[in-house]
Amino acid sequence: MPEEKMGGLMSAKKSGTDGHNEGQKVIMQVENLSKTYIRGKIPIHALRCACITVRKGEFLAIMGPSGSGKSTLLALIGTLEEATDGKVILDGTDLTSVPEKLLPRVRREKIGFIFQHYNLIPTLSALENVELAMRFSGVPKKERKERAKSLLEDLGLGDRLNHRPSELSGGEQQRVSIARALANKPALILADEPTGEVDSKTRDSIVRTFKELSEKGQTILVVTHDPEVAKECSRVLRITDGLIKDN
Amino acid sequence: MFDLIIRNITNRKVRSALTICGIALGIFAVIVMGAMSENFHQTFERSMSVTSDKIRVFAESGVFGGGLEDDKVSDVLRVAGVKDAYGLLMTTFDEDKMGMTGKQILGVPPEKSSVALNPVELKAGRFLNPGDSYSVVVGNNIKREYGLQEGSKFEIHDKYFTVVGILDYTGSIFDNAVIIPLETAQDLYNVGDSVSYIFAVPDERVDAEMLSKRIELSVKGTSTLSPGELEVQAKQSFMIFSVITISSGLLAAIIGGLCVMNTMLMSVAERTREFGILKAIGAETRDILLLTLGEASLMGLLGGILGILVGVVAVYVMNAWLETTRIVLFLITPRLLIIAMVFALLIGALSGLYPAYRASKMSPMEALKHA
């Protein structure tokens, strides 16, 4: 996507305006989200008053230098960490007020994670890794097997179903990871540097997959360093020193 | 979830096998020591049931002190409430083996032999009769060891006795008993009129405990052991024996448990990132607990099965070997097998508890950052 066009589509204001998904319903609202760590006696503000509005089907990139707070933002939205202040409303649920006990259910039903290092279970096959996400949701065995197979086939891994992660290339592992993230049909996919470990050809293929998913209505939030990935996104947010800035 | 547990165990074959062997070793010890205790317990219970209705009267100096003459029997008989009384001489059959085989010579008045042995029944022949002098009634183990039959000759202390009766198997001390007339026994062992103790049979509706006290007060130079006191004393000895045997087994099993805990802690440390991934994709705390605890419990179960199998085989082999010396030391009972199995499972589960707790309490973010 050309830079000029992207500029027109992007919105990085704290108010959280958005671009070509304007007609779509708001799937996520981040309001004044902050995270402060205490190291010794020194407070470290990893994220300050982040406000983002994301509409259904958006393919949103968060860019910023190392340590800028982009992974923290992802962890807070993904309920992997507790916010110091602010709110995350995803698909009508205020995640910041969900009791800790119920967070696994939120992660199962509303969020799909894709990690830089794939984070597949090394002892399970591609099919079993994808099934695993559904297993915790209580999807019946037959159904989860069929769905996992179908997802992997859609991602071009039909001949790799029974291969373990160590028998797959980086790109293949990341596609298994994408299939796992999609398994429970989440409202939002959070991808942390999903192309950080792959070559440019595989990166392009992964980005293409994200775009296709986005076109089908899947909301995707990607943290990336790579401008090549960002330029394919419908919107880019830049973050520096814990502050989301206008693009 | 069970398939994941199995996979985690089989993926670390050598480590899992070593852990399972550690538990198996502990359970093996529980089985062997427990079987020894069970055998002792059964012999004690059966022996008690055979002699529980009688009061034992000893010389004041104790059963090994001597000094209890046969004429004290008439003194005991004179005590109100005593239905019957008779002296018994008890000595080891094979003195050269220090009585380790458990075989005993019982000198009993021939006319009292059926009463003294009641409720033990005869497998063949008869009890001793008045007038018998070199006649012998033998227990079931003695009969098997020496290949005796009714009418066989049996050498005791260089004298030949005729086997007139063979006792049925009782599982008690009477299986190793050689019963001969009291006077013959006194002559044979050159003890004059001495007896080891006197059995006093209480009248019906007479309280044995009270009667026991009355005998002690009425017959000078004696002390008594009522059926109740005997049971308490025997149970105390049995408890001490059981505590020694079972605790040595338990110690071995606890070492097996530490083995599981070590393995599980290592496994949890190695899989920290994996637990983070599981949590990120929606695993509940109880899923992580179940995975870790299930793995530890399954290793406990497998170790238990292996330990029981090896223990049962070892006990069988040892009993077969000891049969030649007439010492039966081990007895496997269903109770022992259940205890060993439950213990193995408990060891596995308890040892897995702390590692499982650690795994389940990890913050998903911290776990994901783990290298």
Image (cartoon, coloured by chain):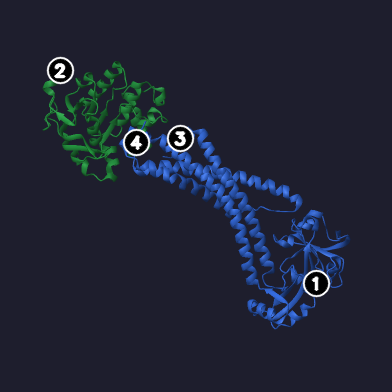
Within 10 Å of the Cα at label 3, are there few (<14), some (14-19), or many (20+) other Cα atoms?
A: some
Tell me the tag on residue B367. Answer: 4
The amino acid type found where label 4 is placed reads Ala
User: Is A216 or A57 nearer to us in this picture?
Assistant: A57
Q: Residue at x 61, y 68 (%)?
A: B232
Residue at 86% x, 69% y: name it. Answer: B132
Q: Indicate which disc residue B194 carries.
A: 1
The chain holding disc 3 is B
Determine whether label 4 and label 2 are within 8 Å by CB: no
Of the two numbered discs 3 and 4 on the same chain, state the one appearing first in sequence. 3
Element type at marker 1? loop
For marks 3 and 4, give the one nearer the viewer. Answer: 4
Quadrant in which residue B170 is drawn: bottom right
Number of the front mark, 1 or 2: 1
Query: How far across and how far down the image is residue B186, in percent?
Result: 83, 69
In the picture of the structure, the residue carrying the numbered disc 2 is A3
Q: Is residue A19 visible?
A: no
SS class, disc 2: helix
Q: Are marks 4 and 1 in contact (CB under 8 Å)?
A: no
CB under 8 Å between discs 1 and 2: no
SS state under label 3? helix
The spot of residue B309 in percent (x, y) is 60, 44
Is B359 on the left-hand or right-hand side of A47?
right
The residue beneath circle 3 is B7
* Tint of chain A: green
The tint of chain B in the picture is blue
Q: Quadrant of the C terminus of chain A?
A: top left
In the rendered structure, which amino acid carries the disc numbered 1? Ser
The secondary structure type at the circle numbered 4 is helix
Q: Which residue extends farthest right?
A: B159
- Label 4 neighbourhood size at 10 Å, few (<14), some (14-19), many (20+)? many
User: Where is B332 relative to B288, above or below?
Assistant: below
